[in-house]
Image (cartoon, rainbow, N blue to C red):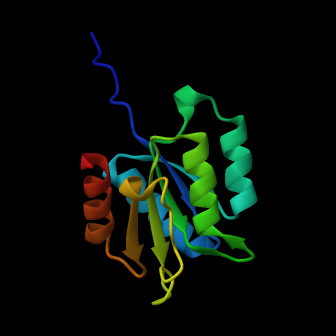
Amino acid sequence: MNAPKPVRRRVLVVDDNGVILKYISDLLYGFGYAPITATRGDEARAIMAKISDADAPDLAIVDIVLGADSGVKLAEDLVARLPGLRVLLISGYADALIDVDLPESRARTFFLRKAFTPGELKGALELMTAA
């Protein structure tokens, strides 16, 4: 008798830089997660609008600066759709968090500065899932 395959936690990854998006997705897959990717906020919102609750992501990794879109606003929209969602905001800009305020979801929101190592991402994911 075959043992059932372990269920991979789904992670929505949103970054407008294709190289970074692939890097994160590859790391996630290697860590045992199932990445769902989007390069823009509107693309991520469209994915979320179509996805069933059973297939919804467990976690989200969102770049704070998404071209003309705001990763913070996207994170707020994602948490409004999935109230238990934990969000990892990422940014390479030193001042990216100056005006960030997610009062409704602060306990479920984390931050990681780019460029991060695989170990730093894995540690952030472990912290998010333990919180």
Using residue 14 as the reference point, say whether residue 120 is left or right of it.
Answer: left
Taking depth in this image into account, of 16 and 86 the one nearest to the observer is 86
State which quadrant residue 63 falls in.
bottom right
What residue do we see at 71% from left, 70% from top? 69
Residue 88, image x and y in percent?
A: 43, 62
In the rendered view, tell whether residue 124 sits above or below residue 3: below
What residue do we see at 33% from left, 30% from top? 6
Residue 101, image x and y in percent?
A: 50, 69
In the rendered view, tell whether residue 124 sits above or below residue 84: below
Using residue 45 as the reference point, say whether residue 112 is left or right of it.
Answer: left
Q: How many numbered callouts?
A: 0
Residue 78, image x and y in percent?
A: 59, 50
Residue 125, image x and y in percent?
A: 32, 56
Taking depth in this image into account, of 13 and 34 the one nearest to the observer is 13
In the rendered view, tell whether residue 47 sits above or below residue 20: above
State which quadrant residue 47 falls in.
top right
Taking depth in this image into account, of 64 and 51 the one nearest to the observer is 64
* Residue farthest front in this picture: 103
Quadrant where the N terminus lies?
Answer: top left
* Residue farthest bottom in this picture: 94
What residue do we see at 72% from left, 36% from top? 50
What residue do we see at 48% from left, 89% from top? 95
State which quadrant residue 15 falls in.
bottom right
